[in-house]
Image (spheres, rainbow, N blue to C red):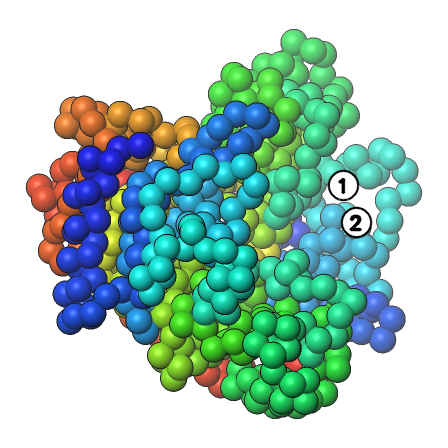
Amino acid sequence: MSSGSAGGSVSAVTALSADRAGSGAPLLDVDALTVHLQVEGVERAVLSDVSLTVSPGEALGLVGESGSGKSMTARAIDRLLPRGARVSGQIRFDGADVQALSSAGLRDYRNKVAMIFQDPRAHVNPVRRIGDFMTEALRTNLGVAPGEATQRAADMLAQVGIEDGRRRLRQYPHELSGGMLQRVMIAAALLTEPRLLLADEPTTALDVTTQAEVMAILDDLRRDLGLAMIFITHDLELAAAICDRTAVMYAGQIVEVRESALMHDDPLHPYSAALAAARPDIAQTAHRLAAIPGRPLSAFEAPEDECAFAPRCPHAADVCRAARPELISLAGGLSRCARAVELRGALRTQPAGAG
Amino acid sequence: MTNAAVPVLGVSGLRKEFGDLVAVNDVSFVVPQAGSLAIVGESGSGKTTIARMIVGLERPTAGEINACGRDRSRPARSASERRKRGSEVQIVFQDPYTSLDPRQTTHGTIDEVLRLHHGWEPARRAERIAELTGLVGLDERQARALPRNLSGGQRQRVAIARALAAEPRVLILDESVAALDVSIQAQVLNLLADIRDSTGVSFVLISHDLAVVRQLTDDVIVLHRGVVVERGRTASVLDEPQHDYTRRLRASVPRPGWKPRRGVLLAADKES
């Protein structure tokens, strides 16, 4: 689509990542990714010019509301897009072009890039035992002997805090609670010793105390194993808790990338600021919340030739409606806001829709 | 708030057994007029079972439920009694995708409630429908739309308008904002606060989300495995939780600077 703007954004992202990692190539490099899907015979954009990098061992949070494209980004990275998807742009993993992988190469790639999902029960065969599906990739893709595979599975269960692993391996999914099944899924994903974990809202369906436990396990294991991660969530604070950097998506685009610790107090895009301000606060009651007017837009609904957030943005001006802004480097982060420089510092103190 | 001390809903010694499982064990609370009570807990705490007993979808094993001075712990004996109960307590469910009739427009959904509960003539119903859709922020097109042509947030507004059409004294919100996007959730929470201010309806908010509880309620009870482990003013319970379980819940909420820690689950809570 907009190959001109893609060039600018990519160099900015790469520069930021190189800063952080000191040197060395990124593990994952997504460059100007645009995806169209066929919906009832009509082609619709779901991702628009998405560029991001993840360094080895780095955790990146990907935050957005429904339709923002955060799950679709993960699916594109894992090559799990629906049939008929039209993809432009590049996805490189460890230097190799993911789009060009053959079926054998793809199998190998999926061992290195593991994925965990929001609803573990929807991604597990209910009539197969835990041990059967946990060891499947080891046995069929990596040629590990069944006894050895079972031992590794039990060891990995211990690492996610499930002590009686041998017994669990003989059980069926319905015998496990949601929190325990999600820990099983994490263990299964880690068995093939991946280098990148794509975690798509892995704790959203869990109780809050279970969520805290699963988040801690994910964070510990990831650091122990030197694993890179893309953590997808709708919750800015949750991403910030375990991710080095956070990327915020809106209408199929990345609108801000920022060090997680700075995102809350020094946001660079009005949407990130508004998202943080709209959440109720456990420590105090607001007379009314700073709601964002309207509703989140999907990529295909967003205006093409202006800022996608402009229709809901309290700071929108003529410049925002003149053209779709590009990602610019600012204060160690990136922002797709035409007024980012002049608004910086004012975003947090004047949340959208306040008063 | 002149009648703040008069309870519109009172529950005492409420108990529900499913076979050997005691889902709700000796739960008591009162909700004053224009007041708001949160029932906080995680899955299996019994919070939704309590809501279902109040609206008559489950029959209590023991205990009393009293709304607007009338007992409702036994099933209604007649259609008119059931209707009467409907005009006292209404419920808004979590999932706006399954709680509306897919063949009914917003207009039709609300009209049915007005016809049943008030028996008004068409002109007066149309007037009230316009008021209610306006109150929940739906426009003319959305008032004519079927649920499938509405977003999740818009459907939840329809469900709220439908509940308000019966002019209930108590609105039960069973995780009613949990499935909504953050920016839409804020809109609906503001809408509920506006409705409370303008109508004096009481809320019972069933929620696992402590920030939502803080925003919308005055009082809270914390449920754990069917038992009330802590109760009090929402602000003081959240600021200074006394019970160990409430502390754990509070510590598990992501917020700026929060770091998840392992071993937060008590041994007793680990699944067998």
- The residue at 68%/41% (across/down) is B98
Dividing the picture into quadrants, the one containing residue A328 is top left
State which quarter of the image contains the C terminus of chain A. Answer: top left
Q: Is residue A203 visible?
A: no
Front in this rendered view, residue A306 or B246 = A306
Q: Is residue A23 visible?
A: yes
Q: Identify the residue under disc 2.
A: B56
Asked if labels 2 and 1 touch by Cβ distance under 8 angstroms, the answer is yes
Dividing the picture into quadrants, the one containing residue A123 is bottom right
- The residue at 31%/71% (across/down) is A56
User: Which chain is mark 2 on?
Assistant: B
Residue A279, above or below A144: above
Q: x, y (%) of residue B7?
A: 62, 52
- The residue at 72%/59% (across/down) is B49
Q: x, y (%) of residue B255?
A: 35, 65
The reply, left or right, for residue A17 in relation to residue B115 is left
Dividing the picture into quadrants, the one containing residue B63 is bottom right
Q: Identify the residue under disc 1.
A: B85
